[in-house]
Image (spheres, rainbow, N blue to C red):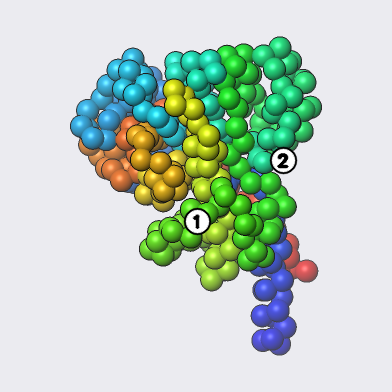
Amino acid sequence: MYLKQRIKKQIMSLSLIGSALLTTGCLHNTQPSTTAESTPVPMASHPLNGKIVSIATGQPLSYTQMLKQLKTSRFILLGEKHDNPEHHLRELQLLKGLQNGRHTRLVLEMLDEKQAEQIDLLSPKSSEAQIQKKLNWNDSSWPWQDYGPLISAALEDQNQLKAGNLSKPVVMQIYQNDMPDQARLTTVKAIPETIKATMQQQVYDSHCQMIPLDQMGPMTQIQLSRDASMAYALSDNLGDNMQAMLVSGTFHARKDTGVPLHLQQRTSEPFVTILLTETDAAVLSIDEAIAPYSEMADYIWFTSRSAEKDYCASLRQQSHQQSDN
């Protein structure tokens, strides 16, 4: 009986892993919290909503001041919570503030290497329908209403549009412990084991601790490879007078574990990380609010909270169903 239960548990774990791998997106983006519970508050009532804070100084600055500082950086990494509508508005605002025609490169986590083959077929005159068709856009993974405006704005300004993510076949190859011999993935090997252990815990927690921790190794390797791919897309053959901007989930943009660790291996040029961060109803002071992010970012841009969702509910339901069978 014990052996039967053990085999059943292994089969269930493999099924859950398969479901996670088939999801185009990365980890669902939980953010560090200083309280056990937080209650959404209207944007106008929270003193930090809309504020931008420099981690270096601990002081707020205006959007115009930040924009002026960003224009001296070669690389801008912007981390979002994927399902927060305000984050997409701020991303579009920042892109338009930095755009400089062909001298701007926009890298999106939401585009993968298979879609990259079609980007050159797009033009400033391409309609939304044409863009979606050419890119074979998967609206269930990345809602067009969230990311379509970014892509359209980049095309209209004739920016370089680059895919940052890995295709599903490559993801499966990495999961099977067969790392592709590709230039964009060479930085993975140099990531310290301590960082990998931290990331493995992140992957474990973000998948609701439903998959055994000792099976998180391959999925951590996938996360590392995605970071490496985005760093490569940012820096590869970037012209001397160009600036590159990345839009990705929070985990990818983090300085302590994400894309910056790979970017530093490829270039010594300056980069800046901005994390779009939801306010916490119980945290009202700047010092307390930015404390969890001291090693993760250069700027924190506070926003209102999106609707609370239980990301783990569907995974738990799937687990219960398989347990009953």
Answer with left or right where residue 134 lies relative to residue 159: right
199 above or below 306?
below
State whether residue 281 appears in this view: no
Identity of the residue drawn at 58% across and 68% down? 215
Q: Residue at x 45, y 48 (%)?
A: 262
In the foreground, 154 or 29: 154
Residue 112's quadrant in the figure? Answer: top right
Decide: few, some or many residues near mark 1? Use Cα within 10 Å; few <14, some 14-19, many ≥20.
Answer: many
Vertical arrangement, residue 44 with respect to residue 191, above or below: above
Circle 2 crowding by C-alpha within 10 Å: few under 14, some 14–19, many from 20: some
Quadrant into which the C terminus falls: bottom right
Residue located 48% across and 53% down the image: 187
Q: Position of residue 180 (x, y in %)?
A: 64, 57
Residue at image x 36%, y 40%? 268
Q: Is residue 148 above or below residue 189?
A: above
The amino acid on which the numbered mark 2 sits, given as a three-letter code, is Lys
Q: Quadrant of the N terminus?
A: bottom right
Where does label 1 land, which residue? 188
- Please indicate whether residue 281 sits to the left or right of residue 185 in the image: left
Name the N-terminal-most of marks 1 and 2.
2
Residue that badge 2 annotates? 114
Q: Amino acid at mark 1?
A: Val
Horizontal and vertical percent position of residue 298: 32, 35
Dot 1 and dot 2 residues touching (CB under 8 Å): no
Quadrant location of residue 297? top left
Q: Secondary structure at mark 2?
A: helix
Q: Quadrant of residue 14?
A: bottom right
